[in-house]
Image (tube, rainbow, N blue to C red):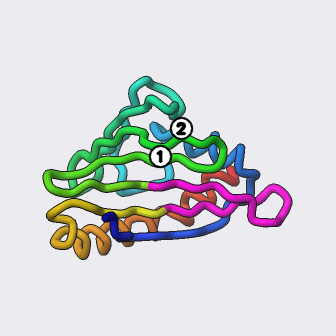
């Protein structure tokens, strides 16, 4: 069973469809996420239900992913991992009740035989990175 390592919910000042469209440009994530050096997506361009890719992460190396859930414009999920650990990244887009505003909820869960060992360090590093990136993402979406 997967256990949540990190979860963040935060607002952006655009409707869900626009938030989805902007975030689906994963190759542009290094513009707002300083911990991400580069992103490669196959097929190139915005995410699709068949997308696969890799993110080069500063000081951590490369993390690969493949799409495992696709519900535009409400949710996508991709899965990656390490030997003995499956990492599930869930991205949700919810209208927050204000016109033209969306709540994004990102949940990262780990499962597998080594997940109890990896989870504390992964959670600490991932939380620090995402907490630094969120304000930059909010500004990037506004621009």
Q: Residue furthest right?
A: 99
What's the residue at 42%, 39% (across, down)? 67
The secondary structure that most of the magenta stretch takes on is strand
Residue beneath disc 1: 29
Which element carries disc 2, helix, strand or loop?
A: loop
Q: Is residue 103 magenta?
A: yes
Q: Residue furthest top?
A: 43
Mark 1, Cα crowd under 10 Å, few <14 / some 14-19 / many 20+, is many
Which element carries disc 1, helix, strand or loop?
A: helix
In the rendered view, tell whether residue 8 sits above or below residue 47.
below
Residue beneath disc 2: 25
Q: CA distance from mark 1 to mark 2?
A: 7 Å
Residues tagged 1 and 2 counted as in contact (Cβ below 8 A): yes
What's the residue at 68%, 50% (across, down)? 143
Start-end of magenta stretch: 90-106
The part of the image, by quadrant, that contains residue 23 is top right
Query: In front: 38, or 62?
Result: 62
Q: Position of residue 120 (x, y in %)?
A: 25, 76
What's the residue at 85%, 59% (across, down)? 99
Query: In front: 49, or 18?
Result: 49
């Amino acid at each position: 069973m997967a256990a949540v390592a990190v979860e963040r919910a935060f607002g952006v000042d655009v409707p869900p469809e626009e938030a989805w469209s902007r975030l689906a440009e994963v190759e542009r994530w290094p513009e707002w996420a300083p911990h991400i050096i580069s992103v490669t997506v196959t097929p190139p361009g915005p995410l699709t239900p068949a997308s696969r890719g890799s993110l080069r992460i500063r000081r951590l190396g490369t993390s690969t992913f493949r799409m495992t859930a696709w519900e535009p414009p409400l949710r996508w999920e991709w899965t990656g991992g390490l030997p003995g650990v499956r990492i599930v990244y869930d991205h949700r887009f919810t209208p927050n009740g204000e016109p033209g505003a969306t709540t994004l909820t990102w949940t990262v869960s780990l499962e597998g035989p080594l997940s109890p060992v990896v989870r504390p360090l992964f959670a600490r590093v991932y939380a620090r990175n995402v907490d630094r990136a969120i304000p930059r993402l909010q500004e990037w979406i506004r621009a």
